[in-house]
Amino acid sequence: MSAKPNHSFNNLDFSDLRSLLPSGKPSMGKGSDGAKKTDTAITEGKPRQAPRTKRSKSFDEAVEGVKAKAAEIAARRIADYDLRILQDSFPFWDDENRGVPNPLIRGGLFGVGTSAKREFLPNMPISSLSNYEITYTGQDLQQDDLSVWMSLINLARQTALSDKVRFTGYQLIRDLGWRMHSESYKRAQESIERLKVTGIKISTKDKAEGYAGSLIREYAWADADERGNTKWMVRFEPKVSVLFMNDTTTLLEWETRKKIGPRATIAQWMHAFYSSHRDPWPLSVQKLHELCRSDAQLSTFRRNLRNALDRLIEVGFLRGYQIVNDQVHVVKTNRPTLAVVSSK
């Protein structure tokens, strides 16, 4: 059987438009003498019909009008994404308090590994406490990759997401708080390349909304300028803005993350994780081991976890903690918070 012709555009069925157009039949009314009369001239007792070409022209004009209007709406929606500025959504977002979507920090998308050799992860489901389902394809992402991404998205927060973000390697390394060394430049460059070649799908449990794409759309660099600074450029996928909603974003204290240090990956992960909860509830050591995607033995992780919690007390993020029956209870330091977080 041959396929039925498709007469639709943007889910509008053009065949339905015929019912909205003049039918060509004369309308009937009443004259002053009470007798019915037609709006069209009568010739030999038969109504005069409009030429078929005239109706066809009206139909074609209506179809073209629908197409033009649909294209205009689609273009406007695209432009809205391209022109979206994250600073508009979060006026308190500044260099000290940086926005990060909860789906990126409430699970194992950015793990706590420290290996320089990154395993390739094909279509891997990500364990998370957020109300999102996450799958990831790409090289293993760690806490240094999250730091790099947050630093770059912060540079872009006051410009349209479709615009190019230009910076120097020196500017990025300084913002990250890494040691000014050629190895740091290489590490940052490799991280950006890794973030570009990613496939991530984040959707709500009911599939009503989500994001699928890469964490960085474009990356380019140029030779060093006269001062020896390498010029870099990145561009983000504009639709990544859908992740930055009022009820799904945390404003993270950047200086605290830097104080923790890039080597204390479990402490960095826990700082981000607990920042996204106003009143953290107890979780088992095993659950935290799963969520942060640690590859250490559980007994080793239990020891490393205590060290991480002690570090969070040292930097002033936690007031205290207890591990009772293998359940981890934390008490956050009371401080004014700008974070837009859930009640838990």
Image (spheres, rainbow, N blue to C red):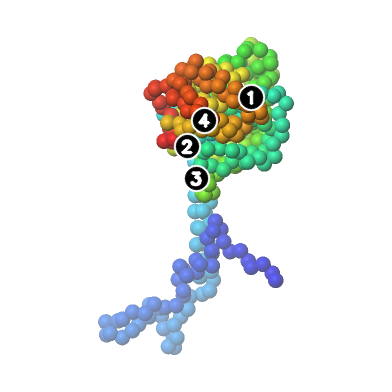
Check disc 1 and report the residue beneath it: 300
Check disc 4 and report the residue beneath it: 325
Q: Amino acid at mark 2?
A: Thr
The kind of secondary structure element at disc 4 is: loop
Report, in whole angstroms, how far the alpha carbon at label 2 lies from the one at label 3. 25 Å
Between residue 129 and residue 159, name the one nearer to us: 129
Q: Earlier in the sequence, mark 4 or mark 3?
A: 3
Q: Amino acid at mark 4?
A: Asn
The kind of secondary structure element at disc 3 is: helix
Residue at 64% across, 15% down: 229
The kind of secondary structure element at disc 2 is: loop
Q: Is residue 12 above or below residue 32?
A: above
Q: Earlier in the sequence, mark 2 or mark 3?
A: 3
- Nearest-to-viewer mark from 2 and 3: 2
Residue 309: give x, y in percent of width and height. Answer: 52, 21
- Nearest-to-viewer mark from 2 and 1: 1
Give the side of residue 322 with respect to residue 182, left or right: left
Between residue 217 and residue 30, name the one nearer to us: 217
Classed neighbour count for the residue bearing mark 2: other residues with Cα under 10 Å, few (<14), some (14–19), many (≥20): some
Q: Which mark is residue 248?
A: 2
